[in-house]
Image (cartoon, coloured by chain):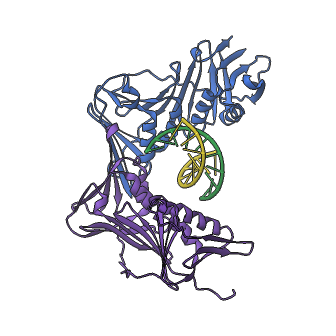
Chain colours: A purple, B blue, C green, D yellow
Amino acid sequence: MFEAKLGSAALLKKIIDSIRDLVSDAPFDCSENALCLQAMDSSHVALVSLKLEVGLFETYRCDRTINLGISLANMAKALKCANNDDTCLIKYDDSETDNIVFCFVDTKRDKTQEVTVKLMDIDSEHLGIPDQDYACVVKMPSSEFQKVCRDLAMFSDSLNVTCTKANISFSGKGDTGGNVINYAPTASADDEDKKESVSIDLREPVNITFSIKYMNQFTKASGLCDTVKLSMSNDVPIVVEYDIEENGYLRFYLAPKIEDEEN
Amino acid sequence: MFEAKLGSAALLKKIIDSIRDLVSDAPFDCSENALCLQAMDSSHVALVSLKLEVGLFETYRCDRTINLGISLANMAKALKCANNDDTCLIKYDDSETDNIVFCFVDTKRDKTQEVTVKLMDIDSEHLGIPDQDYACVVKMPSSEFQKVCRDLAMFSDSLNVTCTKANISFSGKGDTGGNVINYAPTASADDEDKKESVSIDLREPVNITFSIKYMNQFTKASGLCDTVKLSMSNDVPIVVEYDIEENGYLRFYLAPKIEDEEN
DNA sequence: CACTTCCATT
DNA sequence: AATGGAAGTG
């Protein structure tokens, strides 16, 4: 038996909407401490890692570790049935192993809704991702990063990040044009302005290039968190991370492009 | 000579837009007391019945009963020419029997517009629909019913309604999932809350199933009225009714699906 | 947060 | 032409 209740269905909606274009079917790992999901995107280039800790839920009960494979398209359909501030209970009953049930309650309307979604078998290749130290960690407003990616995509297929202590530069170049965007990290470390500012925590300079198409997929999660954290080292996958209400995260991993010298 | 003037073209726009996908050509019965329309949908499964009583019009003149066949696509085109709060005069002149004319006036712009639409011959099979007593009459916010139909369509082709004194339940089930929506009728019969609430007037319990595709067509009329009335008896066509400003109605009739037992 | 409208897509 | 998504308004 697994049962977990979210105060509002909106959160889960946002999460699923931001990964469903990347991953069509995903295994949810339900355990005592958290609800997790890890999956490669369909072309096996990017990795999505989601963690929703117990603290996010109003109630949480997980009798035994279990893995539930779900079509995210169907899950999105189910969540679309909820109003944003409906309560959302996720329920899996061991006696009814084919399905997962989402119960939405709108108390002010005396309305109850039980949406059932069929489960599926997914071989969950739980990739151990090493927690590693990165040469450079940048935090910036997620809407700002979203715009950077959108703007660079105008002319380019790839996004180059060059970061020093004094500056972070995003750039892209294509046949018909190019674009370079620079941010100086905000001097004041005031927590006040933090949300609006770009901060750079740098051990050594970084110069690294990614497919912008995937980046633009990732930034669909911008609504989850005001701030995005980019963790980078040369020649290592970037981590694009959105915190979820202090009790979880949605992380995207993307390997750098191998630069074809002059081609 | 037939001449009837509506205070705003918006009303007629809404009406035509909500039935034009169901019925492509329709006969308007103009008589002394009302402008009526009855038509089967193109696949002869659903019936649309519209009545616009004299009270809806600012002026109304109908010398003799007459039937005007119109392509609703063309009528929609004509109405699209009007601003929503233009005045709308519908005019048919016996000396010009090929056409109907819509005159739109935007007084604050001193703008006048005459749109002429060609008439067509339609054999109007005026089906006498018996006024009957239904086992169950439910009133609920039309937007709510619209959402119910939309949500059920996510996983199912059909909508089952089960209604008792204490509860109304809409449900649907498909291969990949299902959905059950329950409403407890609002206890307070306060007219105040009436718009927000679900009311059930039940003589005997009902359990009946319909094609959701047609229901979703019907609910396009939700903008006409805050409340929808569902009149049901087992094995009898449902009536989905939207009142039009206390002086008319738009009703949809749909025969129940014959349940294939276990298949 | 929800509704409405508009735009883009299939 | 219809559906679904996005944006702006109340």
- Kindly tell me whether residue A35 is visible in this rendering: yes
**Percent of width and height locating residue A151:** 64, 65
The mark tally for this picture is 0
Corner quadrant of residue A49: bottom left
**Percent of width and height locating residue B164:** 27, 33
Which residue, as the protein is rendered here, is positioned at the far bottom?
A261
Corner quadrant of residue A57: bottom left
Q: Quadrant of the image for the N terminus of chain A?
A: bottom left
Image position of B201 with respect to A37: above or below: above
**Percent of width and height locating residue A37:** 36, 69
Q: Quadrant of the image for the C terminus of chain A?
A: bottom right
* B100 or B26, nearer to the observer: B100
**Percent of width and height locating residue B60:** 65, 13
Image position of A71 with respect to A202: above or below: above
Image position of B80 with respect to B52: above or below: below
Corner quadrant of residue A181: bottom right
Residue at 40% from the left image edge and 22% from the top image edge: B132
Residue at 27% from the left image edge and 54% from the top image edge: A58
Q: Is residue B217 left or right of residue B170?
A: right
* B167 or A191, nearer to the observer: A191
- Kindly tell me whether residue B101 is visible in this rendering: no
Q: Is residue A251 left or right of residue B28?
A: left
Which residue, as the protein is rendered here, is positioned at the far left?
A63
Image position of A31 with respect to B124: above or below: below
Residue at 43% from the left image edge and 61% from the top image edge: A16
